[in-house]
Amino acid sequence: MPLFICEKCGAIENTALGHYWCREYFKFKDASLNNKALCSECAPLEFDDGQKTGNNGKWHGRFKKEFFDKSKDDAELFMNGKAYLMLKAGISGEDLVDDTKDDLL
Ligand SMILES: [Zn+2]
C-alpha cells in the first residue's frame, strides 16, 4: 500500500485513493492546490474551468484517517521529491513503491 502525506492537512493517504498520481496534469479553481499530493478529503472539488472533479470533500473511509506524527512514525522514504513514510504498525517495506527508480533509468 504506497502511502503519501497530504500536503494540505498532513493525513497519511494511499496513492490510489487520494489525489496523487494525476496531480501534475490538472489545474484547479483554487490554484494553491495545483500540483499538490492531497488526501481524498482535501482533493479539490472544481477544476479551473468550473467543472466538478468528482471529489466530494470527504475522507473515503477505506481506512482510518491518521496524521503524520514525526515522534511516532519512524520510517521514511522519498517519492517524487516529497517525504513519504510508512507507519510502524502493519505496513512492510514490500508494500511501498519507490518511483524514484524511474529517474535512474
Ligand atoms: Zn488532506
Image (spheres, grey):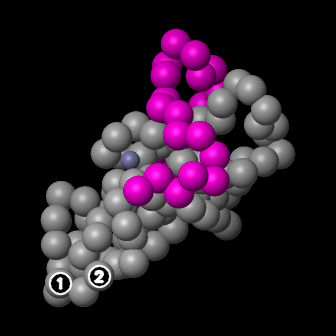
Q: Which residues are magenta?
A: 58-82
Residue 91 visible to an observer of this rendering: yes
Q: Which residue type carries mark 2? A: Lys
Name the residue that disc number 1 marks. Answer: 50
**Nearest the eye: 97 or 47:** 47
Residue found at x 37% / y 67%: 56
Q: In the figure, is residue 53 to the left or right of 3?
A: left
Q: Tag on residue 94?
A: none
How dense is the environment of label 2, judged by Cα within 10 Å: few (below 14), some, or many (20 and up)? Answer: some
Q: Secondary structure at mark 1?
A: loop
How much space separates mark 1 and mark 2, taking CA atoms? Answer: 6 Å
Q: Eyeballing the image, is 84 above or below 49? A: above
Q: Which residue is mark 2?
A: 52
Q: Looking at the magenta stretch, what is its main secondary structure?
A: loop
| Above-or-below relation of 91 to 60 | above
Looking at the rendered structure, the kind of residue marked 1 is Gly
- Res 72 → quadrant: top right
